[in-house]
Image (cartoon, rainbow, N blue to C red):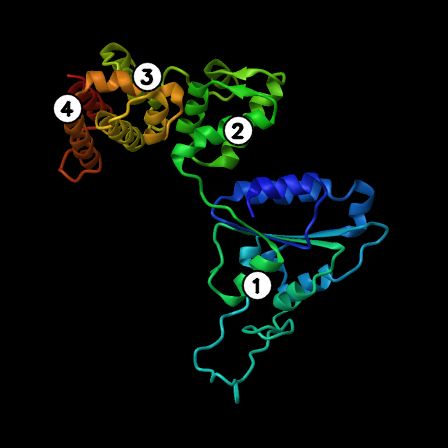
Amino acid sequence: MEFEKIISDLKNKVYHPVYFLMGEEPFFIDAVSDFIDKNVLDESEKEFNQTVVYGGETNIGAVIGSAKRYPMMSNYQVVIVKEAQNMKGLIPKSPSPNLSPSGIGAKIKVSPEGGDLEGATHPFSLYLENPQKSTILVFCHKYKTIDMRTAFAKNLSKRAVVLKSDKMYDNKVPAWVESYIKEKNYTIEPRASQLLTEFLGNDLSKIAKEVEKLMINLPTQTQITTDHIQQYIGISKEYNNFELQAAIGKRDALKANRIINYFASNPKDNPFVVTIALLAGYFSKVLVYHYLPDKSQNNVASALKVNPFFVKDYTLAAGNYPPGKTMDIISLLRQYDLRSKGFEGNSTDEGELMKELVFRIIH
């Protein structure tokens, strides 16, 4: 089930007996778990009806035992298993390939907590067949997924709410930031959204924490700007890779040099490898732009996977860097990436490499 649908159902008090939240992106797992934690029961009900355990400190038999209890003076009880990926025996093992089709003579492996580890008598499998309707059982299985090809996983998908929380691609993060902030009754300038993404990457939990700083200091309905980000988060609105990229695109050598001089004096905050990667992505998009037959704003935005607001920047850059020059720059970026890593026996420091690279790009 999609994250938005799960949250919508929860807000409408449409609850399901079992939630299995898994994947590499912890933000959405935490968001669902936290919503259930904070909203299903009121404070007076939580004392007797809400249980939070950690996967490495319990077992599936104990969790299922808790889930089978009836609530006390409440319509529901909530059982949340955090770090479920650390629980041994959580998922039934696949049947052994040595077993005969009839199963005659096969030995059933029995877990210490009851139930075999391979078949339908595993405690989790049994519980899925007849879950306690008054229990909301939540598994937070972070940073990895289970094999959805197994019989158990297919049954889990039919009988529980399964969220697969994938890591978000970098090019989708700015749009997610805009959507997330809109839900909180704020708006954000495209450049401010891009600045947050450039500085924080695709770590959604970290982005959300930084956005909270903005919301503490700004009233609702505010449009968040790069000035706000600099003031309340501490990300420079002038000296960052996004502004360097824009300056290079305009062939503004003065501004580009001012930024790289700042980078050279603050190397820990502005690693060369990150700048190289971002510039490579930027010029790859400029090259794509050159060969688009339809250069309308919407088509370019879709092809480059950027906010339409930034299409004019790529149009300008394409005018400044013809296709041949753009390909030379991409090759140059690969060369300087290798030099920065010492593959060409070059000992020049990163600050000097950056200055040399920008000069060769612009000129």
Instruction: Decide which of tag 3 and tag 2 comes sooner along the chain.
Output: 2
**In the image: residue 330, left or right of residue 162:** left
Residue located farthest toward the front when viewing the structure as drawn: 294
Which amino acid, by three-letter code, is at mark 2? Ser
Which label sits on residue 140? none
Q: Residue at x 68, y 44 (%)?
A: 36
What is the distance, in whole Å, between disc 4 and disc 1 at their CAs? 55 Å
Instruction: Decide which of tag 2 and tag 1 comes sooner along the chain.
Output: 1
For label 1, the SS is helix
Q: Are marks 2 and 4 in contact (CB under 8 Å)?
A: no
Q: Which residue is mark 2?
A: 179
For label 2, the SS is helix
In front here: 152 or 240?
152
Instruction: Decide which of tag 4 and tag 3 comes sooner along the chain.
Output: 3
Which amino acid, by three-letter code, is at mark 3? Lys
Q: Are marks 4 and 3 in contact (CB under 8 Å)?
A: no
- Asked if 276 appears above or below 321 in the picture, the reply is below
Q: Residues within 10 Å of mark 1 (few under 14, many from 20)?
A: some
Q: Quadrant of residue 279?
A: top left
Query: What is the x, y in percent for residue 227?
Result: 48, 13
Query: What is the x, y in percent for residue 296?
Result: 32, 21
Q: Which residue is mark 3?
A: 312
